[in-house]
Amino acid sequence: MTAQIPDSGKTALITGASRGIGYAIAEAMVARGDRVCITGRNEDALKEAVRRLGADRAVYAVGKAHDQAHQAAAVERTMEAFGRIDHLVNNAGTNPVYSPIADLDLDVIRKVFETNVVSALAFAQLTWKAWQKENGGTIVNMASIAGMSPSPFIAAYGVSKAALVNLTVQLAHEFAPRVRVNAISPAVVKTKFATALYEGREEEAAAAYPLKRLGVPDDIAGAAAFLTSDQAAWITGQTLVVDGGVLLGAGLG
Ligand SMILES: NC(=O)c1ccc[n+]([C@@H]2O[C@H](COP(=O)([O-])OP(=O)(O)OC[C@H]3O[C@@H](n4cnc5c(N)ncnc54)[C@H](OP(=O)(O)O)[C@@H]3O)[C@@H](O)[C@H]2O)c1
């Protein structure tokens, strides 16, 4: 099937991409002709995702996003398979606890920061050194609207995503003009990760959205494809909110 798709000659490393938003981004990038290296913790799921993406267009690296040995191996795998890393998508994220902030276990928030913030910086440092410093490229960090306003019961996650937005700004400033760095902040997107936020009450949850539906992974993939394309050539340091309008709120009227 891949014989019919274009060849951009470009490559992407996408973390957390065996399913959900990351996989949809991988699909969109492969469809426009990129080659991708996807990561995740479950090897069988990665193998199946590579099979669906096309083994001539995709490879995988198995491991946990916060693990330094895995970070280095994923970058090496991408360079070894394709010889370049034009785009880095820091998509892997975690939200292991639902708790009022007053009761938040501090070890949990440390763990959340390791995966959602520190690993994104580590991958950015590694891709910068391996390819982007000399050759340019783009980085997209997957934040969340949970980082923009109070998010009851997922405060640790919200604080980490706010930090990721500022990391985006810091990286954009330091890596310019070679590398553009942007973030995407989705509202609820129907994936395994967000199941607890809508399962059994999707209609009720969707009613709060001016566009009257929850997101699907392709909604976010479109934004990522844009930010990593030349159509976004003069955009850096920004966070694109992709939220079905939910942050517009009801106002006073
Ligand atoms: N869905 C939403 O409503 C929503 C909203 C805003 C932001 N986001 C953000 O979007 C990103 C992707 O979420 P999603 O909804 O697509 O989740 P998902 O459907 O659960 O997919 C997560 C992917 O990441 C991998 N993964 C999970 N934890 C990982 C880790 N520690 N290290 C490496 N890979 C890991 C998973 O594979 P394995 O389980 O095999 O590792 C899977 O491939 C996250 O950063 C999340 O915070 C999601």
Image: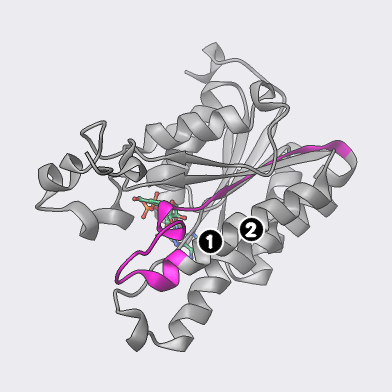
Give the labeled residue for mark 1.
162
Q: From the image, which quarter does the C terminus lie in?
A: top left
| Mark 1: secondary structure | helix
Relative to the observer, which residue lies in front, 191 or 169? 169
Tag shown at residue 2: none
* Residue lying at 73% horizontally and 28% vertically, measured from the top left: 234
Query: Range of the magenta residues?
Result: 135-158
* Residue lying at 46% horizontally and 59% vertically, measured from the top left: 147
* Tags 1 and 2 touching, CB below 8 Å: yes
Query: Residue 47: x, y in percent?
Result: 46, 47
Q: Does 12 sit above or below residue 28?
A: below
Query: Residue 236: x, y in percent?
Result: 70, 39
Q: Residues within 10 Å of mark 2 (few under 14, many from 20)?
A: some
Q: What's the CA distance linking mark 1 and mark 2?
A: 7 Å
| Mark 2: secondary structure | helix
- As drawn, is 63 to the left or to the right of 228? left
Type of amino acid at the residue the image marks with label 1: Ala
Query: Residue 154: x, y in percent?
Result: 35, 69
Give the labeled residue for mark 2.
166
Residue 5: quadrant of the picture: top right
Type of amino acid at the residue the image marks with label 2: Asn
Q: Does 205 sit above or below residue 211?
A: below
